[in-house]
Structures are given as structure tokens and as C-alpha cells.
Image (cartoon, rainbow, N blue to C red):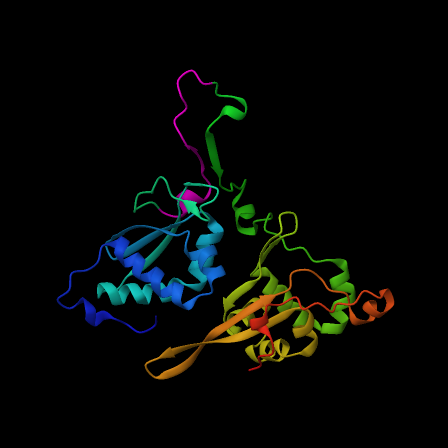
Amino acid sequence: MDQGIKGQSLGVEKPEFQQAWEMVLGDLRAEMSRALYETWVQPLKPIGYQDCTFTVGAYNAYGRAWVEERLSGRITRFLEGLYGEPVHFNVVVSNGFYRPGEGAAVLKNTIPQDLKASETENSLTAVEEEPIPAGEEQTGSGRSRKMMLQRAYGSERAKQIQPERGMFVTGYLFNNWLPLLGHSAFTIILAARSMCYWNPMTGELRNVVETEMGELAERAAVSVRTVKEVLNTELVQRYFLRYRVRRVMTANGVRTAGISLQVRMDDPLTPLDQVKTGIMEEEEWYLPEFSGEKE
């Protein structure tokens, strides 16, 4: 994707924004894992291309932030190659509602292209799925009306802190694993978990991420060298983090393109407690493709 294709714009009509977005999707689909693509990229909907700004809609602020942090640069370069001019890639939160079974938010009402993302973050929108027939009661289970809620904060301070976006750390992890792992490994594990999602109540789990060692180092406030050392530590690999180097073919040969990281979201028993309790952590928690790679 990093290779520009500006030459294609010479003497060729520029694509409509829907066509351009289909090309972007095709390129991303080829480079990303299926799980990441379907979770974060597929739900995005193209809204328009005007004044060198290409706008897409994400169904919530989480989706927007993920795309901006990890894909914005790559998508921008691809679009600049298509249009042959500098492009600003803009992701906004578009207040449609989610249709069960479609696997992504459907943007029923596209928003104006000049609408800023800040104007959509703290709004509450009601959308009718189907017109309510005349004479039908508007109460009880017969209602067709659905709503999508967006966060609203009582102060600018709360908006910055976002107290609902907490991170749960068990006392067991802190008291029993920290002395074994050391502060650097412990912090890197928490940083990696912050990039994932796990809901024990519903079983929803997104614990495979495509990232860079530099990004993980920045989140954990350690050096890239420390991240490499920790990721190749036997204790960390066995119980918490597995990774593999992503490689892509370019005109100049094979090059690395970051890492795919699988993160264990629950806490295992320490080796000592396994012996004491007789509960052994023998089952491999990671996918087969994350077996045994070192860098």
C-alpha cells in the first residue's frame, strides 16, 4: 500500500469516492487479518470526497480512534495515489444504528461532509427502523423505535479523563505475577491488553492486534529494545503474549510490516501456585500461527 500510484491519474478520470473506497478496502483486505478487517474496517462507510478531504463514517468513537491511530497514514497515501493530489483522510462518528446480523453498523443517515467529528461525539439520536403503523401503540414490546447512545460528559475534565474507560487489574496479577515478571514486562503486558477487548459476560474477545513494536514501547513507556527482550522471554511467551513478524512483498523484495500480537486477557496461575493447587496451565491459549517465532 505504501507504493504510490500517482501515475495512474495521468489522463485517467478520477474515481468516484465510492469506487475509491472499494479500492482501499480491497488493498486493506489483502494485508490485514480477517478478524481485524471485519471488526474495524468493514463497518466504515464512505461519505464523500470534497476539497481534497475524503470522509468516512465510523459507528462509534472507538472505531474512529482505532482507524485513525493505525490506518490513517496508509489509507491517506493510497488515496493520494488514486487522486494524484494531497488528500486529508477524515473519520467521523456517524449516528446510524446497528442492525443485528449485518456484522457492522449501518449508516442509515449519512452526515454532511462539513460536519466536524466533535459535533457528533456527545449526541443522542433516535432512528426509526420502520414506520410505526397508524393506530399502533407506542409503548411496550410493540415499539419499532430504536436509539443509539453516545457518551456525554458533565465537564471538560471528565471528557478528557473518560472515567468509564477503565482497565481492570486483579490483585492476583499485581501481587503474584509482578515479582516474577518485573516492572517492564508487567507494564508491557498491561499496554498490550489495553489494545484489546474482552467481555467475560458475553464472551466477546478481540485479542489479536496488528501493531508495531515502537507503538507498544510508547504505550508502555519503555524502549523498543526492552519490548523485543520481553516478547522473547519464555515466561511471557508461555503465559501472556505471543507475536509473529508480518512480512510483505514489495518491489524491492520482502520487508517487515510490524507485528501481529496475540494477548492473553485472563490471568494464569503462577508456576508455584500450579504445583500447590494441582491445577496445571497445560492448554495452549494462543493460535497455532503464533507458535515459536523470534526476532
Picture layout, residue 116 above or below residue 136: below
Q: Residue 173 in the image: x percent, y percent? A: 74, 63
The single residue placed furthest to the left in the displayed view is: 11
Q: Is residue 124 magenta?
A: yes
Tally the numbered discs.
0
Residue at the (12%, 66%) spot, across then down: 11
Please give the name of the residue rendered at 35% of the width and 65% of the height, measured from the top-left corner: 27
| Outermost right residue | 276
Residue at left offset 53%, top offset 47% = 159
On screen, residue 11 versus residue 197, left or right, reads left
Residue at the image position 20 percent from the left and 69 percent from the top: 8
Please identify the quadrant where the N terminus is shown. Answer: bottom left
Among the 4 quarters of the image, the one containing residue 125: top left
Determine the residue located farthest toward the top in the rendered image: 135
| Residue 222 vs residue 127, the one in the foreground | 127
Q: Is residue 119 above or below residue 126?
A: below
Give how far across and how far down residue 110 sits, in percent.
33, 42
Looking at the rendering, in which quadrant would you find the C terminus?
bottom right
Confirm whether the magenta stretch covers residue 14.
no
Residue extent of the magenta highlight:
116-136
Report the side of 278 relative to 69 (left or right). Answer: right
Give x and y (percent) for residue 122. Answer: 47, 41
Q: Give the quadrant of residue 235.
A: bottom right
Give coordinates of residue 278: x percent, y percent: 84, 66
Residue 136 picture quarter: top left
